[in-house]
Structures are given as structure tokens and as C-alpha cells.
Amino acid sequence: MELHNLKPAQGSNKGRKRIARGQGSGHGGTSTRGHKGDGSRSGHYTKRNFEGGQMPLQMRLPKVGFKNPNRVSYVPFNLGQLQAIAEKFGVDSISNEWLLENGFISRTDKVKVLGTGEVTSKLNVSAHACSASAKEAIEKLGGSVNIA
């Protein structure tokens, strides 16, 4: 066997369709473009997602909702949670940095203190935001709220 004797396996190669080479080729006449219509003319172009005139998918789907790019979302901490954390860890001062070190929040989270629950001891809290009722409850016991 030598290089000039090599041939592809029987049926593995198929000749390309030769268009507009006469009736005997089977692709003469309209040259596989059909009769009339836009697709039969030269320069015809179809948009990427064209569905043959059917209503396109992106027009059939409902357009609902809105995602505000300026939204600020907070991780909520209720007064009851803060009291439980203070008792468990034996601290009287809770800050964003302390919550981050102890795994309560991630680096990009913002903290908001909410007024649900009760505070029974003096707490010094530092957070990004605080509700009025939470601030009032903390300061009532002699604690302080620092908005950072």
C-alpha cells in the first residue's frame, strides 16, 4: 500500500450540490430556490431569529417585572436576635466588623436593625441602617445606635 493507492471508504464522501448547472443535474430551473417570493431573489437576507413570519418568540413572551439597579438590600437583624447573640457570646457591643468576623454576614452585606423582639440589656450597636422602633428600644436601656 502506498499513498497514491489510498481511497476513502465507500460512501464516506458525498459530492456537493451543484446548483444551476442545467436540468440534468436535478438542481436547474429555479436552482432550489422555489418560485417567486423574497427568498428566490438575489440579495435575500433573513434575520437571525426569523421564524418564517410566525410571531417571534421574544414577542410572544410576556414583558413583566423590573429590576432596580439602584436597590440597596440589607441583612435584617431583629432586636431579639441581637440580644441572643449578645448573651451567647458575652458581648455588649455589636458592630458590622464583629458580625463579619463571627460569620453572621458576608463582606458585601449591609446590616439593618429592626424592632421585632426585646432587648433586656444595654447594647451598643453599629449598623448601616436602623428602624426608629429599634433605636428607641436600644436607647431606652442606655445603649447606643451608631449608623455607619
Image (cartoon, rainbow, N blue to C red):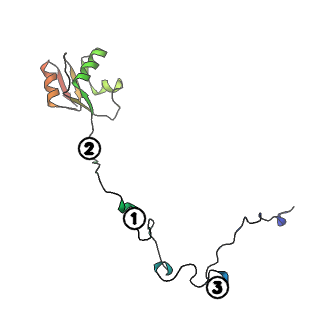
The picture places residue 101, in percent across and down from the top left corner, at 35, 24
Label disc, if present, on residue 56 of the rendered structure: 1
In the rendered image, which quarter contains the N terminus?
A: bottom right
Type of residue at label 2?
Arg
Neighbour tally class for label 2: few under 14, some 14-19, many 20 plus, Cα within 10 Å: few
In whole angstroms, how far apart are the C-alphas of marks 2 and 3? 67 Å
The picture places residue 57, in percent across and down from the top left corner, at 40, 61
**Res. 22 in view:** no
According to the picture, the residue beneath numbered tag 3 turns out to be 23
Instruction: Give whichever of 21, 51 is nearer the camera.
Output: 51
In the image, what residue occupies the spot 21% across and 21% down?
A: 124
Total marks in image = 3
In whole angstroms, how far apart are the C-alphas of marks 1 and 2? 32 Å
**Image quadrant where residue 117 sits:** top left
Question: Which numbered disc, 2 or 3, marks the residue that appears first in the sequence?
Answer: 3
Q: From what the image shows, is residue 4 above or below residue 31?
A: above
Type of residue at label 1?
Pro
Instruction: Say which element carries label 1.
Output: loop
In whole angstroms, how far apart are the C-alphas of marks 1 and 3? 37 Å
86 lies left or right of 31: left
Type of residue at label 3?
Gln
According to the picture, the residue beneath numbered tag 2 turns out to be 71
In the rendered image, which quarter contains the C terminus?
A: top left
The picture places residue 78, in percent across and down from the top left corner, at 23, 26
Neighbour tally class for label 3: few under 14, some 14-19, many 20 plus, Cα within 10 Å: few
Instruction: Give whichever of 80, 29 is nearer the camera.
Output: 29
Instruction: Say which element carries label 2.
Output: loop
In the image, what residue occupies the spot 27% across and 18% down?
A: 84
The picture places residue 45, in percent across and down from the top left corner, at 46, 74
7 lies left or right of 125: right
Instruction: Say which element carries label 3.
Output: helix
Neighbour tally class for label 1: few under 14, some 14-19, many 20 plus, Cα within 10 Å: few
